[in-house]
Image (spheres, grey):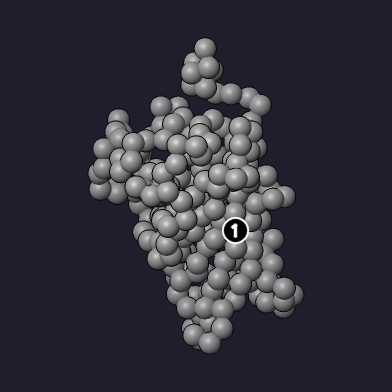
């Protein structure tokens, strides 16, 4: 049975660490809304933006659309890695649509959707599923998640900050960042002119779900 104590990562796949820093974006603040509960990600107001360096001269930027669910039984103590929630549900589950890629360049979009890059015809969806959650001293969430892209799973590290202004009792707004090594997922295998790492920036807006889980009902009783 998994515990909340830190332990070596036993998950298969390729570990990609976050080289961007979101730690400074938020600090512990008891006035921030408590994001416990189940939240449905609004696909119309949530995106995953990416920045992909090319030849160290310029950077391709674009975005993907996605949908999913956030579920949080409660935040673990600061510095404690929680591998499983009492409900057994992952904190974050998302489906990303590689065919939705938008870079403001139609030819580039078509190339990225193609078999050498995102391969959007054979692999219709990318999935992101959290495996652990840790709250850092700054209040930032450190989430380890399995990303499955082009049918290949690998671990990515994401840092999320709850945005207190637009967040409220029925709305949860998160900003996050992570870095993936595109070679680990077979993205652009022959693209020697592209950098190996793609930076991800996530802007997530979610609404509280009307249906509560058994854990939520027990807490409300």
Q: Quadrant of residue 17?
A: bottom left
Q: Which residue is mark 1?
A: 48
148 to 69, vertically: above or below? below
Question: Where 139 falls versus 89 (above or below)?
Answer: below
Q: Position of residue 10 (x, y in %)?
A: 30, 47
Tell whether 43 sits left or right of 2. right
Query: In front here: 189 or 98?
Result: 98
Q: Nearer the viewer, residue 46 or 106?
A: 46
Tell me which residue sits at (37%, 44%) in the image.
Answer: 134
| Crowd rating for badge 1 (residues with CA inside 10 Å; few <14, some 14–19, many 20+) | many
Residue 204 coordinates in the image, percent (x, y): 60, 49
- Where residue 161 sits: x, y (%)? 49, 50
Expressed as whole percent of the image width and height from the top left, the position of residue 116 reads 58, 73
Residue at (67, 65) in percent of width and height: 101
Q: Is residue 163 visible?
A: yes
Q: Which residue is at the far top?
A: 221
Q: Quadrant of residue 38?
A: top right
Query: In front here: 185 or 209?
Result: 209
Q: Residue at x 26, y 37 (%)?
A: 5
Q: Quadrant of the N terminus?
A: top left
Marks counted in the figure total 1
Specify the quadrant of the image occupied by residue 154: bottom left
Q: Residue furthest right?
A: 106
Residue at 55%, 47% in the rendered image: 163
| Helix, strand or loop at mark 1 | strand
**Most foreground residue, 49 or 180:** 49
Judge whether residue 89 can be spotted in this image: no
Apparent side of residue 205 relative to residue 37 in the rendered image (left or right): right
């Amino acid at each position: 049975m998994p515990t909340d104590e830190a332990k070596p990562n036993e998950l298969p796949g390729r570990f990609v660490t976050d080289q961007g820093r979101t730690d400074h974006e938020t600090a512990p603040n008891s006035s921030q809304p408590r994001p416990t509960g189940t939240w449905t990600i609004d696909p119309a107001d949530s995106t995953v933006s990416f920045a992909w360096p090319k030849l160290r001269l310029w950077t391709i930027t674009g975005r993907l659309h996605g949908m999913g669910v956030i579920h949080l039984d409660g935040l673990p103590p600061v510095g404690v890695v929680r591998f499983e929630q009492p409900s057994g549900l992952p904190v974050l589950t998302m489906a990303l649509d590689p065919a939705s890629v938008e870079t403001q360049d139609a030819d580039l979009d078509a190339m990225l959707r193609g078999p050498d890059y995102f391969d959007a015809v054979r692999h219709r969806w990318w999935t992101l599923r959290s495996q652990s959650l840790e709250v850092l001293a700054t209040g930032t969430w450190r989430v380890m998640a399995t990303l499955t892209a082009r049918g290949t799973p690998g671990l990515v590290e994401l840092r999320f900050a709850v945005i207190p202004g637009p967040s409220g009792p029925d709305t949860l707004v998160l900003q996050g960042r992570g870095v993936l090594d595109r070679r680990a997922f077979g993205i652009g295998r022959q693209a020697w002119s592209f950098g190996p790492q793609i930076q991800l920036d996530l802007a997530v807006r979610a609404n509280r779900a009307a249906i509560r889980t058994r854990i939520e009902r027990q807490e409300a009783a």
